[in-house]
Amino acid sequence: MTTPAPVEDPSFSLAGTREPPRRVLMKGNEAIAEAAIQAGCDAYFGYPITPQAELLEWMARRMPEEGRAFVQAESELGAINMALGAGAAGARVLVSSSGPGVSLMAEAMSYMAGSEVPMVLINVMRGGPGLGSIGPSQSDYFQAVKGHGHGDYRVPVLAPSSIGEAMELVATAFELAEHYRTPVIILADGIMGQAMEPVEQHYRTPARQTAAWALTGADGREPRVVRSLHLAPEELEEHNAHLQEKFHAIAEHEVRWAGERLDDADLVIVAYGTAARVARTAIARARAAGLRVGLFRPISLWPFPSAELASVADRARGLLVVELSAGQMVEDVRLAVGGGIPVAFEGRTGGMVPSPDEVVEALRELDATGGPLRRRRVRRRPPIPVSGTGHLHPHEPMAEPETGHDALSIFGDDAWMPHWYTVPVPTRPTRNGHGRGQGRNGSAERRPDDEGGSR
Amino acid sequence: MTATVPAAPRVIYQRPARLTDVSTRYCPGCGHGIIHRLVAEVLEDLGVDGRTIAVAPVGCSVFAYEYLAYDWCEAPHGRAPAVATGIRRVRPDAFVLTYQGDGDLAAIGTGEIVHAAARGELITAIFVNNGIYGMTGGQMAPTTLVGQRTTSSPTGRDVRAAGYPVPMTEMLAVLPGVAFAARGSIADPSAIGRTKSYIRKACEAQIRGEGFAIVEVLSNCPVGWGMTAQESIRYLQDVVVQTYPLGVLVDRRSGAQAGSSGAQAGAARPGTPSGATRQAEPHPAGQEA
Ligand SMILES: Cc1ncc(C[n+]2csc(CCOP(=O)(O)OP(=O)(O)O)c2C)c(N)n1
Ligand code: SF4
Ligand SMILES: [Mg+2]
C-alpha cells in the first residue's frame, strides 16, 4: 500500500474537501471533530474541559466556516440541553466532554433516552473520581455502560482504539442515534484525544433519515410533542415496553468487536480503547517469549459482545482483562463467560497506563495458574472476527517486540496501519421492519456470516 | 330623523384557534390558564402560530402542550432556555417560546436563563411568578415574599435563613443581550391587558431579531398560598406587587420610546455599538427530511 506524504502545514483547511483519503498527522480530538463535521454534524455544543478542549476549539473554528451551529455553553448542563433542543428539532448533534462534565449531563441523557432524541456524546475520559486528574483513564466505563441518568434505559456505547477507528465510529454513532432515536456515547480517553497519529482522511456521511417526529412548527399538520413525561402508570409502562423492545433490538443487531491472534490462543486479553493498544504490544512480547496470547477487543461496550467472548473463552485457558481503571469491565467479562475459566485483571488508575511488560507479567501469572486447555472439548470453532476498521486483521503481521521502550510502546510496537476496506455494517431491521444493511459508501450488503465478528 | 342601521354582527371575543378545547389540570382560580390564553392570542395576532416551537417547563404548566397546540419540546427542570437555544440555533425560521415557573427559572434554572439572556438568544420567555413551588405542594421558592408561609417556611420566610426574594427580571434587564423585559400581572382586567401588550412586544423583539425578551407575569396559586381564589387575587394586588413592581424594566428595541414605570427605554447596550441588533441568519441545519 502506498503511503502519501504527510501534510506539513498543520493549518490546512478541510472545508468542502471530498478528495481521496490523504494520510496526515492529526491530534485525536481534532480528527474526531473533523470526522463529525464530515459526517454531517449540524450542531455542536460544549464546555471546555481537559483532555477534550481541542475538540471544542476545532468546532469553534470549523462549524461557523461550514455555516453550522456552534455554542460554547455556560456549563455542561447548558450544552447537553442545547443538544436536546437541537436534536428534538431534527438536527444531527454532537456534544463532547470528559468525566466531570459528563456527570453533569446525566440528567439530560435520561430525558433524551426517554423522549428518544438522537445525539452523540463523546467522553474523552480522564482520571476520577471527583476532579481526579487530567491523565488518560477508562474509569467512566460504569458511568457510560451502566449509568448516567435515572430510569430504565440503555444507550449504545462505542469504544475506538485508534484515532482512525474513532473517526469511523463517529459516523456509525450518528447512524445508530438516528436509526434507533437514541443518544449514543463514544468512549475515548485522554491518550486518544491528545495523541497525534497518522490518519487517513476517510470520511463517511450517513444518509439522513426521515424525522417524522421532529419539531419544525405545526403548520398544516398536527402538533408534535417531544417528551418523556407519561404521568399515567399504564401509559409509562407501555412507553417503557417500547423502549425495552428497542434496547433488545440494539443488543441483537449492534454488537461490535474485534479479535487478533485468537486462532491458537491459550490466553486471551480482553481490552478496549487505549488498553487494547498496550495489550497488542504485550501480546507481541509474550508470543516472543513462547506464550500463545490473543486479543478480544469489544468495540461496542453496550451491547457487550458477551456471546462472542464466551465462544472465544471456550477455547482458552484464561482471560486477562486490561484496563486503565480499577477493573470496571471485569464484571461484564465474568458475566459473559460464567465461572468456568479464570478471569484475571491488570490495570492502573489515576491517569497511569499499564506498561506492556506489566501486562506480560500478568500473562505469565495467568499462564501458571490458568486452568487446563479446554479447546478439545469444543466442537465448533468460533468465527474469525473482523474488526470495525480493518487495521486489526488477524493475519496482519505484527511488529517484532522491542524492549526498553515502554514509554513509547503504546504507539510504538504496533504502529498504526491504515488499511481501509468495506466495513461490514450490521444488518438491522428498519422502522418498518425490513432488513437493512449496506457497506461503506452504499456498497453491497455483507452478510453477517461472511466473516463473523462484527454483528 | 334617520333610522339607525343595526350593525352587522361581529365577533368580539372567541377562543384563540390554538387554545385547545379541553379542561385543564389546573386548580380552580389558577392564573396559568389566563396566561396561556394571552400567549395564544398574541401568537395568533402576530401570525407565528405555524412556526412556533415552544419549550415546556417542569412545574404545574408541564402539560402546557395539552392546552396550546404548537410543536413542543419538554425540558428538564429549569433547562428550558438551553433547550430553546438548541432549537433556535438549528431552526432559524422558527418562533421560539419558553414558558417557565419561578422555581424552574429563578432557582434550579438560574444559570440557563442568565446565559440565554446574555447571549441575546432570539427567544421569548414567559416567566410565571407565583412565588411558590406549586407542583410539588407549595414549598418556598426563591421568589417567595419575606414572611410568606409555605410548607417549607412554615413560620414565614425568614431572611436570616432563606435570604430575600430574587428580582430575576430586574437582574436580567441589565444584560445587553436583553431587548425587552417587563413585569405584568393577572390580578385584574387592566393588568391583564397590559401584560398582553408586554407579551406582544416581547414576541416582536424576537421576530425583528432584536434579542432576548422576557415577560414576568405575577400569578396566583390559591392552593399553595392557602387562600381562596378571590383572596389570592387580592393578595396579588395588594401585597405581591410591593415586592415586584409592575411595568417595563428595559426596552432596547429599536424605536422604543421612554415608557412608564422608570423603564430604560431605548437603553444603550454596554459593550455593544448603540442600537446594535442581531439578525437571525439563515442556517442550513436541520431541514425537515
Ligand atoms: C431535577 C428536579 N428536581 C426537582 C423536581 C421536582 N419539581 C417538580 S416541579 C417543581 C417546582 C415547580 O415550581 P415552579 O417552577 O414555580 O412552577 P409552578 O408549579 O409553581 O407553576 C419541582 C421542584 C424535578 N422534577 N426535577
Ligand atoms: S398548585 Fe398553584 S400553580 Fe399549580 S395548578 Fe394549582 S393553583 Fe395553579
Ligand atoms: Mg411557581
Image: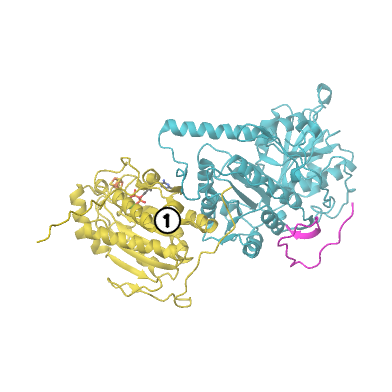
Q: Position of residue A404 (x, y in %)?
A: 86, 54
Q: Residue at x 51, y 42 (%)?
A: A115
Q: Does the rendering let one see residue A17?
A: yes
Judge left or right: residue B127 versus residue B192. Answer: right
The question of residue A12 being in magenta is answered with: yes
Among the chains pictured, the one given cyan colouring is A
Whether residue A247 is situated above or below residue B182 in the rendered picture: above
Quadrant containing the N terminus of chain B is: bottom left
Residue A434 figure quarter? top right
Whether residue A136 is situated above or below residue A221 in the rendered picture: below
Q: Position of residue A234 (x, y in %)?
A: 43, 30
Q: Residue at x 79, y 38 (%)?
A: A386
Which is more toward the observer, B175 or A335? B175
Q: Looking at this view, name the residue that lies furthest to the left.
A: B1
Q: Residue at x 57, y 42 (%)?
A: A147
Which is more toward the observer, B50 or B82? B50
Q: Position of residue A443 (x, y in %)?
A: 77, 42
Q: Does the rendering let one see residue B132?
A: no
Which is more toward the observer, A378 or B72? B72
The question of residue B175 being in magenta is answered with: no
Read off the magenta span: A1-27
Among the chains pictured, the one given yellow colouring is B
Whether residue B84 is situated above or below residue A455 in the rendered picture: below
Judge left or right: residue A47 versus residue A173. Answer: left
Secondary element at tag 1: loop
CB of mark 1 near ligand 1 (< 8 Å):
no
Q: Which residue matches tag 1? A: B48
Residue B198 figure quarter? bottom left
Which is more toward the observer, A93 or B5? B5
Q: Looking at this view, name the residue that lies furthest to the bottom.
A: B274
Judge left or right: residue A300 versus residue B255. Answer: right
